[in-house]
Amino acid sequence: MKSISVPYAKLNVKGGGVMPAKIKVANPNRCIGCYSCMLACSRANADSVSLIDSAIDIRTSGGIESGIGIIVCRSCIDPPCARACPTGALAPRNGGGVVLNKNLCDSCGVCADACLPRAIHFDRADMPVICIHCGVCARFCSHDVLEIRKTEVL
Amino acid sequence: MWSNVLYIDLETGEHHTRDRHDLFDKYLGGTGVATQLLLEECPPGIDALSPGNPIIFSIGPLTTIFPCVSKVVSMFKSPMTGELGESHAGGRLAMAMRFAGYDSIVIKGRAAKPTYLSIHDDEVKLKDATSIWNLSSVEVTGKILREVEPGKGRRSIMRIGKAGVNQVRYANVNVDTYRHFGRLGLGAVFGSKNLKAIVISGTEEVELPDMSAYKKMYSKLYEEVVDTEVMDKYHDLGTAANINVLNQLKGLPTKNLKQSHFENAESISGEYFADNLLLRKIACSNCPIGCIHIAMLKTPFQKGHEFEVSHISYDYELIYSLGTNLGITMGEDVLRLIDRCEQYGLDIMSTGGVLAWATEMYERDLITPPDTLGISLRWGDTDNYLKIIDRIVDMPNKFYKALAKGTAVAAAEYGGKEFALNLGRLEIAGYHTGPASIVGQIVGVRHSHLDNGGYSIDQKASSQQLNEEQMVDKLIYEDYWRMINNSLVCCLFARGVYGEQNMIDALECVGIKKTRDDLEAIGKEIFLAKYAFKEREGFDMDNISVPARFFETVSQLGMLKEDTVKNMLKLYRKKTGI
Ligand code: SF4
Ligand code: SF4
Ligand code: SF4
Ligand code: SF4
């Protein structure tokens, strides 16, 4: 199995701004449905043990026998979620994806509808959970399903 | 935190939650708490299939918080043994309970009509299951409930099949298609309560006192799980790797333990399954290992390449009980038998034991075609075994009714006790490794072969020259510490990771401070509480007869002597004070 020591720290630039990396679902068919990635995302980014606080979403469709779906931000360069947001709470992020300004968010849900992969959902406080492309989930995926990749910095 | 118990009464439809920190503070969770709840809720001496028998589920303080802490304990009075029934299951159930906010669930009474339970966060409902009550297949039941219940994608669904509905004493409860509460007959208890299924999901989040210490500890444990060799075996071939290993060592029960090695082991070995039949591996929630091996079986049913395809999970114990123990020579045939049992929701180890005993009875003309309704029982005859399994579930006559109650009951009626391979009325696990395995199953502190890993103590005995007393000491150590593992409800495959110090440190991260001695004392206390229940319900070690067959077939440690087992039991009693 894969070692935990993926050199991700360099890529993890906290606090917005230029984030020269993006999460990539590299090998979806290798997923074993362990939820380690989801728990890692909420642990790292929401300081909680939770599924609902995770920006990556692992789910079965029609039972465990029918395979496992992986839903995470596809880092759109021209993000429809941001375009749809009526308050400007979501702004395009350098390298793809979006950055959320919670202070501006109305919890209206328009962004979630605009994202076809359904990579946005709402937490218990009714705030959208948005992937910041930090790569922690990839670090805790033991089956090389997820990768953190450098992007062209704009 | 960690002490919320949901009580549900199927008779009145009422439910409420209670904070039982009195129990959780003292006994951590899992097996420790469930034992106390069982002592509280189960009236002495009741019939296991009467409404008075409670069903208890419990998770622990580390559930879903640390990797591989992924199991749920269920407790009930067992209709197989008439005493302590304890069974553990993985899948998504533990995580679903955690995020629904329930650390234990206690189900009492009997519903007037077929019912299923729908539990989503605070919403707890009894729903009508009349239309699915007679569905024979656990798979179809799951499919139907998925359509009508919320929590899509991450809920857990427990359900029984026709075996549970008909109260076959060793019916199991299927969890999320590939996992089970197996062995001691929880499925029959569900059936007796008119309870077809339980769906559970939740959206809670857990916050811990010191997040940074927690994150560090998580990474440490995760690294030990994936980066060291401790768990390699489970990830690679899985437990099925044991087939070839035990076969070489002469520890593999074969044809009702007439032999301890199997001439055809190669074509039903873990290697054979992995190379020819393995489709993929999946994991219990929060376990990065993925030890659940799923095989694909293609069965042609018509010309023109028409195939029926089924996905079947396999493990060592299943291949032993429906494979070697029945003289089945091909992996594909083992899968057909596993699949049939799975569809009905039968415990596979007991089913295999029952079939093996019946085959030997038939071989000796102690049962005859009028008993079996014309079906002959022969080693390796998969087609006929499938027919027998159907009849065990349907129980068309006295003989099949007896088979549905297990080997001990059937042998009391039809004879062949000396080769009815049960210990304390439960069919044996797949290890003829030596005396520690036998003693481990007799003392039966938990449920089956994972009581205390007696088989691995036998293996150590051969390499380290352990004497009887040293073996007993090791059994007792395992018994006490597994009480702790089982109260946190770590996966026992990860027991190499969750050693004493890691348990202490992990507990500290969730605000529970215990020393090594504290934990050992708690382990011992839980052990004694279980024995209190067992003895209350009539368990008596002296009354457990060991079938002569154990001493007639060479084991991994050579020929075994009855006196060794007796002496070890005596030492065990003396040292534990039971
Ligand atoms: S959230 Fe959806 S729409 Fe927005 S950038 Fe990500 S994938 Fe694109
Ligand atoms: S929910 Fe918030 S981020 Fe999403 S569209 Fe509405 S205001 Fe914008
Ligand atoms: S990249 Fe970071 S924020 Fe995005 S899903 Fe993974 S862990 Fe969560
Ligand atoms: S950690 Fe990897 S294998 Fe596990 S659920 Fe996530 S993507 Fe799948």
Image (tube, rainbow, N blue to C red):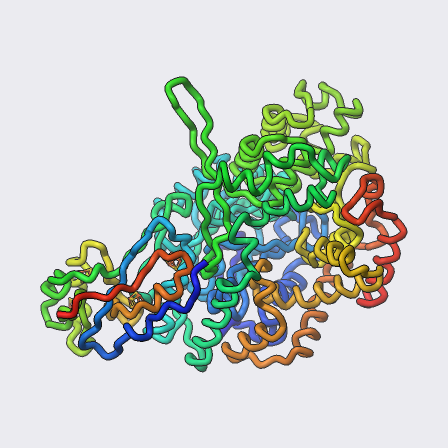
Q: Is residue B126 left or right of residue A68?
A: right
Q: Residue at x 50, y 78 (%)?
A: B509
Q: Position of residue B257 (x, y in %)?
A: 75, 38
Name the foreground residue: B24 vs B131: B24
Dividing the picture into quarters, in which one does residue A49 lie? Answer: bottom left
Q: Which image quarter: residue B141?
A: top left
Residue B433 is situated, as x and y percent measured from the top left of the image, at 75, 49
Seen at 70% across and 33% down, the residue is B356
Can residue A130 be seen at all in this image of the molecule? no
Extreme-right residue of the structure: B563
Whole-percent x, y for residue A138 in the image: 35, 63
Tell me: residue A34, above or below residue A39. Answer: above
How many marks do you count on the picture?
Answer: 0
Q: Is residue B296 above or below residue B39?
A: above
Judge by depth and name the residue closer to the eye, B90 or B250.
Answer: B250
Name the residue rendered at 84%, 57% in the picture.
B569
Residue under the image location 79 percent in, 22 percent down: B365
Figure check: B129 above or below A43: above
In the rendered image, the quadrant that contains the C terminus of chain B is bottom right
Which image quadrant shows ligand 4?
Answer: bottom left
Dividing the picture into quarters, in which one does residue B465 lie? Answer: bottom right
Residue B177, visible in the rendered structure? yes
Q: Give x and y (percent) for residue A93.
A: 16, 70
